[in-house]
Amino acid sequence: MEKPKVATEQASAPDSTAALMAEAQVVFAGGANAARLYDRDKMGTGYRISGPAIVLQVDTTLVMPPGWAGEVDAYVNLLLEWAS
């Protein structure tokens, strides 16, 4: 069996507001915070966000607490890391 090839997406200068849907008050361990709500389908390669945030997509919802950041890689994965 031949190994499948996985296509990558070209990096572009992402519009920082393209995926932003709204803002909502969300309660985390430290209390209530204003969190941005993002549409995952509109987050292309190079798109960056920081917590607190909520990422909505068809099959899941990702809750990103304060202090975390994420970036979409060339394979369109949203990679999260502790930023603080």
Image: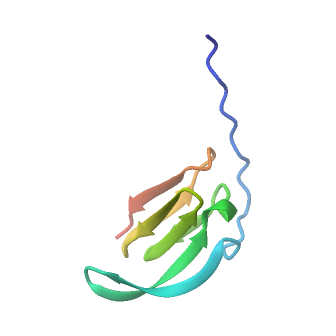
Residue at the spot 62% in from the left edge and 63% down from the top edge: 47
Question: Residue 3, position in %: x, y?
Answer: 61, 18
The image's colour scheme reads: rainbow
Relative to residue 62, is residue 72 drawn left or right?
right
Quarter occupied by the C terminus: bottom left
Question: Residue 60, position in %: x, y?
Answer: 50, 59
Q: Residue lying furthest left in this view?
A: 29
Question: Residue 43, position in %: x, y?
Answer: 65, 62
Q: Residue lying furthest front in this view?
A: 59
Residue at the spot 44% in from the left edge and 58% down from the top edge: 80
**Closer to the camera, 27 or 80?**
27
Residue at the spot 47% in from the left edge and 74% down from the top edge: 53
Quarter occupied by the N terminus: top right
**Closer to the camera, 61 or 78?**
61
Q: Is residue 57 above or below residue 36?
A: above
Total labels drawn? 0
Residue at the spot 42% in from the left edge and 68% down from the top edge: 63
Relative to residue 59, is residue 29 drawn left or right?
left
Q: Is residue 50 above or below residue 8?
A: below
Query: Which quadrant of the structure image shows residue 25?
Result: bottom left
**Closer to the camera, 10 or 36?**
36
Q: Is residue 71 above or below residue 67?
A: above
Relative to residue 42, is residue 80 drawn left or right?
left
Query: Which quadrant of the structure image shows residue 37?
Result: bottom right
Relative to residue 76, is residue 36 drawn left or right?
left
